[in-house]
Amino acid sequence: MTSYVDRQEKLKTGLDRDAALRLKNNRLGMTIFQASWIMVFFAIIVVNWQLRFSYAQWPPVGVAPFDPLLPSIATLALLLSAALVRQGWGGLRGGKLGEFLVSWRLAMALGIGFMTIIVYEFMTVSEAALATQYGITLRLMTGFHFVHALAILAVMLHVYRGACAGAYSGGEREAWAVEGAAKLWYFVAVAWMLFYVVLYWIR
Amino acid sequence: MATIAVPLGAEIESHEAEAVQRPALSEYLRWSVDHKIIGVQYGVASFLFFIIGGAMAMLIRLELWTPDLDVMVSGAAYNSLFTMHGTVMIFLFIIPMWAAFGNFVVPLQLGAKDMAFPWLNAFAFWLIPPAAIVVLLGYFVTPAEAGWTSYPPLSTLFSGDGQTLWALGAHLLGISSIMGSINFIVTIFNMRPPQMTIWRMPLLCWAVLATSIIAVMATPFLAGALTLLLLDRVAGTTFFDAAGGGDVLLWQNIFWFYSHPAVYIMVLPGMGVLSEVLSVHSRKPVFGYRMVGLSSMGIAFVGFTVWAHHMFTSLQPELRIPFMITTMIIAVPTGIKMFSWLGTIWGGKIRFTSAMLFALGFMSMFVIGGITGVMLAALPFDIHVHDTYFVVSHFHFVLFGGSVFAIYAALYHWFPKVTGRMMNERLGRIHFAFTYFGFLFTFFPMHIVGMLGMPRRVAVYDEAFANWNQLISFSAFVLGFSTFIVIYNIIRSYYRGPVAGANPWRALTLEWATTSPPPVTNFTDDPIPFEDPYGYGTEASAAYLDAVEAAFDGNENRTILD
């Protein structure tokens, strides 16, 4: 009756057929959603790229290039945060709730640090840059990414509070919410890496 | 003879002909997570929008009856009218209408109890009514005037607040479409019964899979474009304004990167319907099954590489030829489908049911729309007929002669499964005759006036085209009238139609191996698909069909044909 994939699922997780199917559906659905929604970020990269051709050079004449120092620190913080999310999720799968709580607390703090720097970048674009698409696209991209980071941080906070209240005793079955939130946070990190390279390194 | 595994036979003892258990009508007005209810909700809602969009088309044709401006108060009013006509027909009718058939039929064809994410499914549907209200309300404030393509600067500097509402509504519809498509892909990959490998999957599922892949990969570009449009309109940015360093072509690139694949979102499910209907009603296996499934994927893939042919006149000259070539390549997978359909009906035992007539109508009309598509792909010809009625004719042949004919074929084919009652075949044939000839004489002459040079999107035109336009308008009214026939047929058949039984067409796919309409869980046991979804004409398939019939209807309840 069960396919190869089903049997593997059963071996790995010990779930019954319906729960295993739900988990399988959730995972595939999340993958497709990520593949789909990253296309919006690609669309915005295309915007940035095409607008460069309106100018003789990029950044435009008379506009100082953005300083990549602070954003690079923010990027490191975000990557570290994603790694901690991974570690916490792994800990929860192994039944170690304490490890999960500590990792996610740190991850969320780093996430907030990242977002603070991004807000600072958004607010401090020079007047000269804002008179051109160089500054406007920075605001578009950081702002657009910030909205996603904020929403997904809220999801992580929700999951974290659930874990504090004892919603996830460990094991694969109840951990889908954790897995989903973690995968959304990876999405934030990947999307930012794309924007970071385009904004600060490709001239 | 092969042993036939019959679904559910053991659990079902007797069936009275009149015991058609249908959901109460009030269930369709409420939140429901049942894919069958949601399918009907999608269908009825989009049909309503078809009527609204059709009424707008009638007004357009009334205005064009004479060369002067007589019905509309101004050219701007005419602009907003055809803008709404296009928007309603594309975003609120055709795309959700395919979600209707996909929702109802796909889980049944896969033998699944429901879609993978029932709640998400309902949510995707319930985004449509508010989106529709937002878009239509825009018509009553200062309406959008930039056509359904909303090119800046028309859509940024010259359109009123209706354009902002248009963009918001389109945003919601895009999100709805993405969520629905994620659901379809997961359902098709994960919810098939173990015996149904991907190469034994019905072709409608293949088509919906290809459509959904396009929708999830392309619709985010629409979301990006609409976000920029909204920012330009309300936040004072200048992405599309050259005065502020922006670029008007930016919109065209991003919009068409979504909207050209969206053309295939609108027609691919129709092609899937054709493969189902032609095979069932001519009692023959689909010719070249694998190639048809793969050609859907081929269209989906190549469809992403052709968008700039919508911008031939504004594109850098050196980029035109590559896009001309990719556009012509699209004809290859489409041609595979056309030959498969011809091969399927060739030598078949054709039953000229209403569904079959509309399917044959699709073939004859879509081939014209396809050929004018190749003509338009040829750069020198395109520059000659650019922005004329030739283009209008081309895309109506594809979207009406293609998609709408397929929607009608699907309606006549699956109506018995949805309601448990047959549609009236005589009315169906009358409907077909009016639609076919009304359509042909509405849109074919547009090729001619287009070549003669009549521009599109104008309310006032040269005297020389007056006679042609009267013919076009008259035929359009005939076409509009034909819709009333099918509405009457639907309502009458819903209450009075003959009881259909489980499998009135003697079809092999799994949606027919359960009662009509199916019970809440679709099947009372895990259904077992026949080894080949289109294996008509063998003893084994006849035995399978007899067994299904015996399990659900008994012998006296045969309703139709064969």
Image (cartoon, coloured by chain):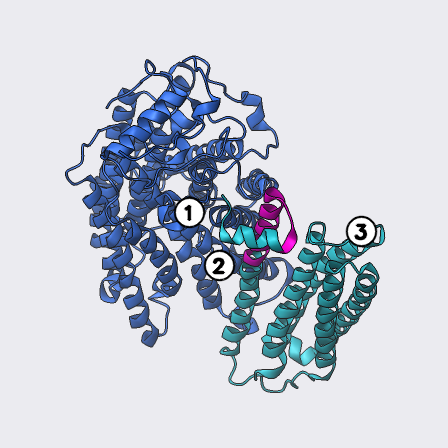
Residues shaded magenta: A12-32
Marks 2 and 3 in Cβ contact (< 8 Å): no
Chain designation of label 3: A
Give the alpha-carbon distance from disc 2 to disc 3, as whole Å.
33 Å
Chain designation of label 2: B
The residue identified by callout 1 is: B208
Query: Is residue A185 or residue A99 the one in the foreground?
Result: A99
Amino acid at the residue labelled 3: Gly
Rendered hue of chain A is cyan
Marks 2 and 1 in Cβ contact (< 8 Å): no
What is the tally of numbered marks visible in this picture? 3
Amino acid at the residue labelled 1: Val
| Image position of B224 (left or right of B196) | right
Secondary structure, mark 3, is helix
B173 versus B37 height, above or below:
below
Viewer-nearest of discs 2 and 1? 1
The residue identified by callout 3 is: A162
Give the alpha-carbon distance from disc 2 to disc 1, as whole Å.
14 Å
Marks 1 & 3 on one chain: no
Q: Would you say residue B341 sits in the magenta stretch?
A: no
Residue count near mark 1 (Cα–Cα under 10 Å), binned few <14, some 14–19, many ≥20: many
Marks 2 & 1 on one chain: yes
Percent from the top left, x then y, of residue B68? 32, 42
Amino acid at the residue labelled 2: Met
Note whether residue B503 is visible: no
The residue identified by callout 2 is: B217
Question: Mark 2 or 1 closer to N-term?
Answer: 1
Name the quadrant containing residue A121.
Answer: bottom right
Name the quadrant containing residue B440.
Answer: top left
Q: Residue at x 51, y 32 (%)?
A: B41
Chain (blue): B
Query: Is residue B499 or residue B7 the one in the foreground?
Result: B7
